[in-house]
Image (cartoon, grey):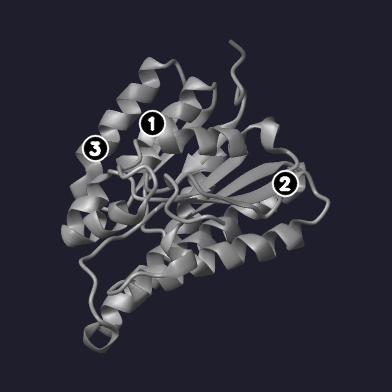
Amino acid sequence: MAKRLKGKVALVTGSSSGIGAGVAKAFAREGADIVLNYPNKSEERDVWDVEKAIEKLGRRVMVVKADVSVEAQVKRMVNQAHKAFGKIDILVNNAGHADRGAPVQDMSVEMFDRMIGVHLRGTFLCTKYVLPQMYERDYGKIINVSTQFAFGGTPLFTHYNAAKAGVIAMTHTLALEVGERNINVNCVAMGATWTPMVEQVPPEKPKTVLAKQTKHRFGDVDKDIVPTFVFLASEESRFYVGQTLGPNGGDVFS
């Protein structure tokens, strides 16, 4: 079977576990070399496991610790990746942050800023520092990550939903800026998916989401979510521009 990403280099932020890890390993199976990213020491063991899995697939892989909300760390990460591999063909802005949420009146400014910082500022910073070399080579695939909640919201998560809605707006705008260049910018807004982040939200929240979903189950990272990322990273998606694809089990129709 032809490898759809053969010869490509992909930077996947937040790739120590969950969707990011699944995407990184899937890209490696499709022939890509991978830059893994994780934010702090607590995720080191997980990211090393992902690294080993990719090495077993015969692909080159490097690991970079960086908080995507911090400009200097993002700039260093991108420079290290470019120095090691000579290019970044695919950027997946997946890095995320979860908390238990709060009503707006009880939400601390620090809680709000952290969520916006990782999801929205992080997407901006990574794109800002990867995009110039994509322009130089006139090639690139940028895949942003949002959520179905960006379309309808959900109580207690104003900060998360606002950040993810901003990511979709950023996707639209950047797609226009890229224009006729050979660079595609798209977004994945998945539904309820079982990842370690789910364990950090109130247990009643996923149950509420699944109750109104057509399939009434969590998405499986490898079977239900990752294929959309592989498609958007491949040449099969070359006519997809500024789109938001929603593997969400029928939770939201967009």
Q: Nearer the viewer, mark 1 or mark 3?
A: 1
N-terminal of the pair, mark 2 or mark 3, is 3
Q: Nearer the viewer, residue 41 or 83?
A: 41
Estimate the x, y position of residue 27 in percent, counting from the top left: 50, 29
- Measure the alpha-carbon separation of dots 2 and 3: 31 Å
- Mark 2 nearby-residue class (10 Å; few <14, some 14–19, many ≥20): many
Judged left or right of residue 55, residue 123 is right
User: Quadrant of residue 104 in the image?
Assistant: bottom left
- Sequence order check, earlier mark of 1 and 3: 3
Which is more N-terminal, label 2 or label 1?
A: 2
Q: Which mark is residue 183?
A: 2
Helix, strand or loop for disc 3: helix
What amino acid does circle 2 point to?
Ile
Q: Amino acid at mark 3?
A: Asp
Q: Is residue 235 left or right of residue 130?
A: right
**Closer to us: mark 1 or mark 2?**
1
The answer to whether the residues at label 2 and label 3 have Cβ atoms under 8 Å apart is: no
Residue 121 shows in the view:
no
Residue at x 25%, y 52% (from the top left corner) = 197
Q: Which residue corresponds to the image point at 47% horizontal and 53% vertical from the top-left?
A: 76
Q: Label for residue 209?
A: none
Mark 1 → mark 3, Cα distance in angstroms: 17 Å
Q: Amino acid at mark 1?
A: Asp
123 with respect to 134 (left or right):
left
Q: Which mark is residue 46?
A: 3
Q: Is residue 221 above or below residue 160?
A: above
Q: Secondary structure at mark 1?
A: helix
Residue toward you, 108 or 78 = 108
Residue where numbered disc 1 is placed: 222
Q: Residue furthest bottom?
A: 105
Instruction: Give the residue at x 70% y 45%.
Output: 240
